[in-house]
Amino acid sequence: MPIALAFFVQYAYGILFFWVLLEQLGIPIPSIPLLLTAGTLSATHRIHASYALADVVLACLIADSMWFVLGQRYGGAVLRLLCRFSLEASTCVAKTEGYFTRRGPVTLLFAKFIPGLSTLAAPISGQAGMPYSRFLLWDLAGSVLWAETYLLAGRFFGDIAQKSQRFFEIISRFAFAIVILLVFSLMAYRVWKNRRFLLEIRELRLEPEELKRMLDTAAAQGNTAPFIVDLRHPLDYLPDPRVLPGAVRVSPSEIAAQSEMIPRDRDVILYCTCPSEETSARVAKQLLRLGIYRVRPLRGGFERWRDAGYPLEDYVAPAEQASRTAAVLAS
């Protein structure tokens, strides 16, 4: 048996535990290749599948419980930190919050199968006020489903490989190299995907300083100001319910249905809470397909505008604003 494979077999449970724990804590080191390897080796009875399953599930529960408590205590700050360092910019906070809005705690059942969502699901559960006992039940079920899926897939491959002794010897000889290649391939793909996404949104986004100048110029010259859309999730309103001057709140999932309210003859500025402006960029592309061309995401979103000390105001719904204007005109 190759030295690397023998080392893995000897310390398999410890390696699995700490590798999965680190991944679930947010470090972008994919653990699926290791789960597949452990499952394959269980076909030769060098690793006990039940022990490996318990090992992986325990690592998931420890990491997820920690993120749950941090999300419960610090809310959006934790989510933005995770999103900033994630290699999955296209699976950011707002997208994860959307899953919870549509499916609730059932999201935890499949969260670990979706890159990015895996780590974000736990702190969002805490931020949303989910009872820990309920979170633990769903997270346990999701962790078992995720781990068992890849362990069984590896076991299935191992059973097939054993039918050909020559093939199994080749797999055993190069097992370590195959695992390392899979790990680095997955990481390289995520880095490439993230970089491509960031390059796409750089072509569209608007700096807060530029938006401030646009608003000041419009106010000074009596021109129509840019149309600003707040795409934040309701959970993101809790720490600071204010909006940018004149902003209208629209859910990303409802933007197509409400596209008629968005003007075509002036600039449309979108902002969210993701550090990479993922939601704003995705909605901007959607509006471009609907024929709204003067649309741009705000770089840094709400936080960068607020931290720059630029003006914010209490939100006034369009219907309420119209009634206020009518009252002023009547008086």
Image (tube, rainbow, N blue to C red):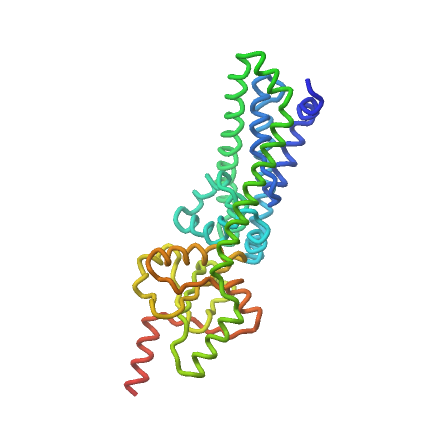
Q: Who's the residue at 45% across and 44% down the image? A: 107
The correct choice, above or below, for 137 with respect to 298 in the image is above
Q: Is residue 31 above or below residue 281?
A: above
Q: Nearer the viewer, residue 15 or 56?
A: 15
| x and y percentages locating residue 288 in the rendered image | 37, 58
Which x, y percent locates residue 136?
52, 42
Left or right: residue 192 compared with residue 249 = right
Quarter-of-image position of residue 275: bottom right
**Does the image show residue 50?**
no
Q: Residue at x 52, y 29 (%)?
A: 150
Q: Position of residue 264 (x, y in %)?
A: 33, 67
| Residue 220 visible in this rendered orientation of the protein | yes
Task: Give the position of the N terminus as an image quadrant.
Answer: top right
Q: Quadrant of the C terminus?
A: bottom left
Whether residue 8 is situated above or below residue 270 in the rendered picture: above
* Camera-nearest residue between 325 and 182: 182
Q: How many marks?
A: 0
Residue at left 52%, top 67%?
207
